[in-house]
Amino acid sequence: MTVELQHIRAARERIAGKVERTPIVLSQSLSDRAGHSVYLKLEHHQTTGAFKLRGASNAIAALSSEQKSRGVVAASTGNHGRALAHAAKLEGMRAVICMSKLVPENKLDAIRRLGAEVRIIGNSQDDAQQEVDRLVGEEGLVMLPPFDHPDIIAGQGTLGLEIMEQVTGATAVLVPLSGGGLASGVAAAVKSMSPNTKVIGISMARGAAMKASLDTGRPVQVEELPTLADSLGGGIGLDNQLTFAMCRDLLDDVVLLSEDQIAAGIRHAYEDEREIVEGAGAVGIGALLAGKIKAIGPVVLILSGRNIDMNLHRRIVCGDHSLTERAA
């Protein structure tokens, strides 16, 4: 089982009018540094502040009337929960979002404001998933996971369609990598339309579950650790059905960043691009600044989200090194 270009194109039709076609801009500062064109896909301008709305909207639109009447439930590190809450609210549906104690308070508040029920369970996304499984079994809610679901992946893949339409001749696309829903969807779209374009996953060095799984050759658990790229935390599921195989087969490389490099990406986005992005949204910039990307032509960086606590953002852009020293 996999997600292909036809599924992604069908998803685009299904979510038309429910999500934004986000802009793409040339970064002069990064282009000058890299020696070639560098484009920023401003997905953090999406309605809920992150790419997750694409997959959530597609998955909910694909539900039957009977399934919609039961409501939906998911584990989340924040952005998927917010997207699912938004999409469910538009349909008048019940939504329950289960999260760990590591999810920042600003993301919890945003989900609550959309009318979803929030449940804080344990210290990891795997702990939160246990509550999801209970609610599915005891209350009959429909589980829409944050990444390992064909409709979620197809929805995220619409971002890849837009990139290929907006930038001619891209040699590489840098994609934030966590559970792999975004990376596998974007890679499926990009590779189908331009097989020679490299798709590179970018994650943090602290607790990168997909990278550890790819290195091992099968899904594995890793310790979930505090990181500035909190949206990239969590496991990929030991029974992963889709994203592990798709990332294994479609990604050209995976790059890991230190906390200092993530912070540098956040600062650059603010100071040079005039954009506020969260840690996960800044990893492409961080990888380029750190010299970890080798390319000879146009490169596209996906700024995947902006839902950062603004007090934390202020400390990062002001150079508070205690944040990265504590995480190291």
Image: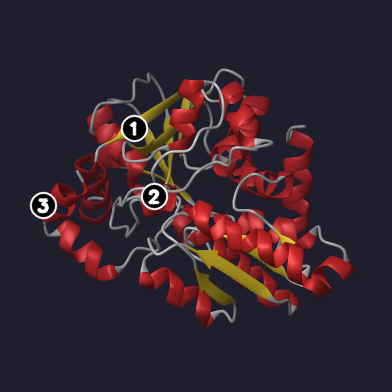
Q: Position of residue 29 (x, y in %)?
A: 24, 40
Q: Which residue is mark 1?
A: 256
* Above or below: residue 168 compared with residue 98: above
Say which label, 3 or 2, has the lower sequence index: 2
* Helix, strand or loop for disc 3: loop
Quadrant of the rendering where the N terminus is positioned: top right
Look at label 2 and name its amino acid: Gly
Q: Which image quadrant for residue 202?
A: top left
Residue at 74% across / 49% down in the picture?
A: 11
Quadrant of the rendering where the C terminus is positioned: top left
Residue at 63% across / 27% down in the picture?
A: 245
How many numbered tags mark residues here? Answer: 3
In this picture, residue 138 sits left or right of residue 73? right
In this picture, residue 197 sits left or right of residue 91? left
**What's the distance in space between the residues labelled 3 and 2, CA to CA?**
20 Å
Q: Which residue is mark 3?
A: 321
Q: Position of residue 251 (x, y in %)?
A: 53, 25
Look at label 3 and name its amino acid: His
Task: Please state which of the two labelled residues, at mark 2 or mark 1, is closer to the viewer.
Answer: 1
Q: Which image quadrant for residue 28?
A: top left
The crowd level at tag 2 (other Cα within 10 Å; few <14, some 14-19, many 20+) is many
Q: Which residue is mark 2?
A: 281
Q: Are marks 2 and 1 in contact (CB under 8 Å)?
A: no
- 80 or 190: nearer the viewer: 80
Residue 47, visible in the rendered structure? no
The crowd level at tag 3 (other Cα within 10 Å; few <14, some 14-19, many 20+) is few
- 203 or 156: nearer the viewer: 203
In this picture, residue 261 sits left or right of residue 80? left
